[in-house]
Amino acid sequence: MGGRIRTRLRYWFDNFLGRSTLTLVACLTLVCLAVVIPASVAQVLVGRPVPTTLAGQAAAVWTTVGATLRIGGAVGAPAFVVLSVLLALVSLLFVSTLVSVITTGMNDKILELRLGRSTIVEEQHTVVLGWSDQVFPVISELVTANAHRRRATVALLAPRDKVQMEEEITTKVGATGATRVVCRSGSPTDPAVLARVSPHTAAAVIVLSPGDHEGDWTVVRTLLALGTVVGAAAAPTVVAAVREPSHHTAAVLAAGPGGRVLDIDAITARLLAQCSRQPGLSLVYQELLDFAGCEFHTVQEPALTGRTYGDALLSYARSCVVGLLRPDGRPALNPPASTVITERDRIILITEDDTTALVSDEPLPFDENAIVLPLPRETKPARMLLMGWNRRAPLIIDQLARYVGPDSRLDLVPGGPWAPHDLDALDVLAYDSVIVLGSEVAGSVGTADSDYHVLETLLHLRAAEQAAGRSLHVAAELSDDRNRLIAPMSPGADFVVSGRLISLLMTQISENPRTAALFEELFTAGGNRIHLGPAADYVPLGHTVAFADVVAAGRRRDRSVIGYRLHAGSATGPRFGVRVNPGKDERVVFGEADTVIAITRDR
């Protein structure tokens, strides 16, 4: 019974609120008077002193009602009372209207800010367009890159709720320090919406693929909209990425002459092919691409003008020289040691930041006796196994054909995951290296199921390694970087997470556009590449040597040495034995399984 009464009362109240404004005002006035007048009478009667006459009591009640309703409550001649009430009502109406207008305006502004539809006013900021899992490593790396700047801004525009974006960034990126992240909601393909993040005044614009089957088309449309907004003004650095090689040309045309468009599938395939031949290579790229450690920089150094590239290799105590940037913007990675540096050349080096790229007055000393001649090594045919299949598999096969020697063999086993008896039948331990790919559903760009199949296969491979008591070099492709952290890691394993790799690469290029051509050569089979070779080819094993000795040994072989990897630490994170850009005076003892990291054109 009580529930029915509450329901009927609620229904009556809803109907009451649905009436016209005039009816609501009249009803509310009657209710207000029905409460205020009796209460005012009671207040007068219980007050001290109580007026003795009826007229006095009526005047007291009127004064109380007027004070309560803010309509004056003046007493005197009738005309005076009427005019005072009218003035009070006009004042009340004006003040109420003013408060309502201000409140409505503030609410509209707060709603506009909450919806992320206002225009930002910034200069030299970084604009990120689109939303995907890549947005978190991109913002995280930008925050790290801006750590030493007093004021930096990252403007994010995506078709998502502004508050939701801010909450996810706070949760997954954490504190942003001196970098302010400003989110705006809307479609980056709409020029009117795109103008909200002021791309024409930005230093760099990063265009992310949304990660669906129309992601590449969205990137192209965003680049076209960006060109419309920026126009003929001084264009910012534009970096984008597409997944399908067939869309790359269209994206390059849309980005314009100053834009850089990365081919995700091609870069992933090249790195997987390189990692399958170079254990630990993915760790080196991880070190070079994130801003937490050392990365590529270019500096103008007049002190080296007229000297040779070989001299430059040993001219920086805390940096590793890897090449020259020519006046036309072309990088000359690892040129011959006799190459003379001109006044217009820039030095390409690996260093922590610009403050550590300090040139020495003279080339740093090294021990000539610590340099050994490399042992002759016979190039043996490689035997490789490719497990799984996706759209990148043909690209990987093409890249492998360029890296391996003659008479090499690649066995293909599509499908997966594989049970232990399948691995026994394949005799996986007989292969020099194994590449594990995740299968994918047609039209998808990476699924949880594909990573699950890869992780399950890696578990079986590690069990086979442990049972046989030997290590197998495995290069695996993952879609989600979180799975890399939980993957069964063996000392010889390399993980390539395409989304994170491209995120780091895009951020590096946005911060230093000159490195774009450099990375392009490193990922190309015919150019210079990062090589991990036996330390015994550089210096004697079991003896303490300085890193300058290793650099000098590499110079003798036309190689630019940038670090080393110690086998003793290959199973211990987070660097897994990789040491990039050590000090030239750093002392180290190499063993038989240790490797030296260098940039070389050798296969």
Image (cartoon, rainbow, N blue to C red):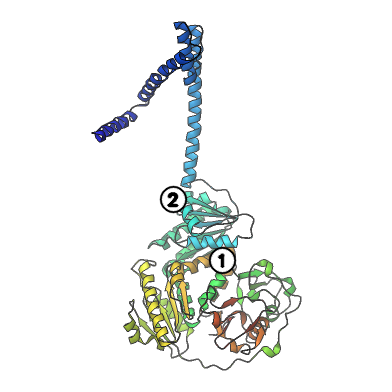
- Corner quadrant of residue 382: bottom left
Q: Is residue 409 visible?
A: no
Query: In the rendering, at what x and y percent does residue 42 appear?
Result: 43, 16
Near mark 2 (Cα within 10 A), the count class, few <14, some 14-19 or many ≥20, is some
- 413 horizontally vs 113: left or right: left
Query: What's the CA distance linking mark 2 and mark 1?
Result: 28 Å
**Secondary-structure class at tag 1:** helix
Question: Residue 69 versus residue 97: which sits nearer the camera?
Answer: 69
Query: In the rendering, at what x and y percent does residue 231 appear?
Result: 54, 54
- The N terminus: image quadrant: top left
**Secondary-structure class at tag 2:** loop
The structure residue drawn at horizontal position 49% and vertical position 36%, both measured from the top left corner, is 105
Please name the residue that numbered disc 1 is placed on: 508
Q: Is residue 587 visible?
A: yes
- Corner quadrant of residue 587: bottom right
Q: Which mark is residue 464?
A: none
Q: Is residue 529 above or below residue 105?
A: below
Please name the residue that numbered disc 2 is placed on: 161
The residue at the far left in this view is 1
Contact between labelled residues 1 and 2, with CB atoms less than 8 Å apart? no
Q: How many marks?
A: 2
Question: Residue 365 versus residue 171: which sits nearer the camera?
Answer: 171
Amino acid at the residue labelled 2: Asp
